[in-house]
Image (tube, coloured by chain):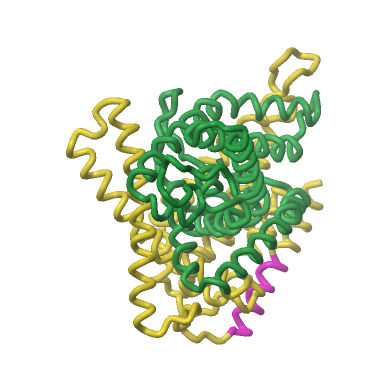
Amino acid sequence: MHIAEGYLPPVHAAAWAAASAPFVIHGMRALTREVRANPESTLLLGAAGAFTFVLSALKIPSVTGSCSHPTGTGLGAILFRPPIMAVLGTITLLFQALLLAHGGLTTLGANVFSLAVVGPWAGFGVYVLLRRSGAPLMVAVFFGAFTADLSTYCVTSVQLALAFPDPGSGVVGALAKFGGIFAVTQIPLAVSEGLLTVLVMRLLVQSSKGELTRLGVLLQGGAEKEAAVR
Amino acid sequence: MLPIDAAAHGSRWRGRHPGEKAALGLGLTVCAVALPPWPGAVLVAAAAVAVLLGPAGVAPRQLWRAWRIPLGFCVTGAVPLLFAVGGPDGFVALAPDGPLHAVRLLLRTSAASLGVLLFAFTTPMSDLLPRLTRAGVPGPVVDVALVMYRIAFLLLDAVHRIRQAQAARLGHTSRAAAWRSLAGLAATAFVRAFDRAQRLHTGLAGRGYDGTLRVLVPSAAVSVRFLAATAGLLAGLVALTLVLERSVL
């Protein structure tokens, strides 16, 4: 879920933009270095960003019976690494705000922090830890995507709780309120996104070994020699 | 092409400099967020609707179809403010000022959304993105955004057609089939995105591609009159809000 335009008070909107800025600038520097070293990367990174945008437009069936959208941040972070995802996620959120009226410009900083910074880093962290501890690729992919999705919504809950503290119990009560609402829908959705990401990765291992090897997800030689981590 | 972007390409204000439209649209959004919701957000919303339907020439139906999306998020987002948790009235109870806070939030978010829609309905991405380099965004990042913008529409179209083909082959008849179809859809989108990028690279390499995407940007001069009118409108909204607020108090 993106925080809608105008939802956050001005001070909160500015604070979250300031918190996101270092990660986005770091990602922009990494992307610029990559493109200067390999000019053809512009097109591949553009394709990766377009894939992220389209992934966030797919509807996944939810356990609660409704449909929702995957965040795509877990798969994106595993495939393209978190610094690049900070930039691609920011561009995707800008496109969604201007082309689909999802999210907003004053809330872009807050949405970038949850969806393009915390989600990818948390998901990638879990993925790396599991791979280093010897877990199979698909197990690491599932928990990476699950964590990325859930951490995104946890951060969104914190952002909303800080902006709208409960009149009786303050920020803690508001966090329980927003977190409780999200938990009903988002835990099943995080499981759904984890399962979907595993299915997508299985298909990619079968059909796109070349791209996955180039991205560092697989080692040279095929799926049976998956990269532990770089 | 997505409806908002299609409308922006055919907008009456297409030829105007994006900076002018950003000053107006985002200025209205900032006013909606910064001014008191009553009467500030109401005045901002009225001004934004008047500009959108009047000088900007956006069709009312198009505006409603785009606005109802953020409006839906605003309504769902306002509902939690109606309740208090862990207070003296029980674990969950109606918040004393909940309806007031919810209405204020609704006014603020709906007015702010209209400001962004004013910018989005009049400024195509293809006019905005190349100019971001002048705002300090590194060239390679803008190039990646341009490629994303061009490939995203092709991918969305491909995804739509693949979904239709899956439905025609009974790909959504059971939960298991729906999951298989969805995974296949995402994986095909990945493969097609990279295939498109490879083909784009091959085509550009044949035309002397050196890592920089050079695109023609329609020239547009910044209109001082437009900016002055924008400043006047925003200042008028701020002044009217403060006057009305004091007279009500």
Residue at point 32% right, 50% down? B159
The residue lying toward the viewer, choosing from B65 and A66, is: A66
Please tell me how many numbered marks the rendered image carries: 0
The residue lying toward the viewer, choosing from A162 and B229, is: A162
Q: Main secondary structure of the magenta part?
A: helix
The residue lying toward the viewer, choosing from A142 and B113, is: A142
Instruction: Give the percent coordinates (x, y) of residue A38.
Output: 52, 71
Instruction: Give the percent coordinates (x, y) of residue A97.
Output: 53, 55
Q: Colour of chain B?
A: yellow
Indicate whether residue B234 is drawn in magenta: yes
Q: Colour of chain A?
A: green
Residue at point 64% right, 36% down? A129
Instruction: Give the percent coordinates (x, y) of residue B196.
Output: 34, 63
* Magenta region: B222-236
Q: On the picture, is B2 further left or further right than A226?
A: left
Quadrant housing the N terminus of chain A: top right
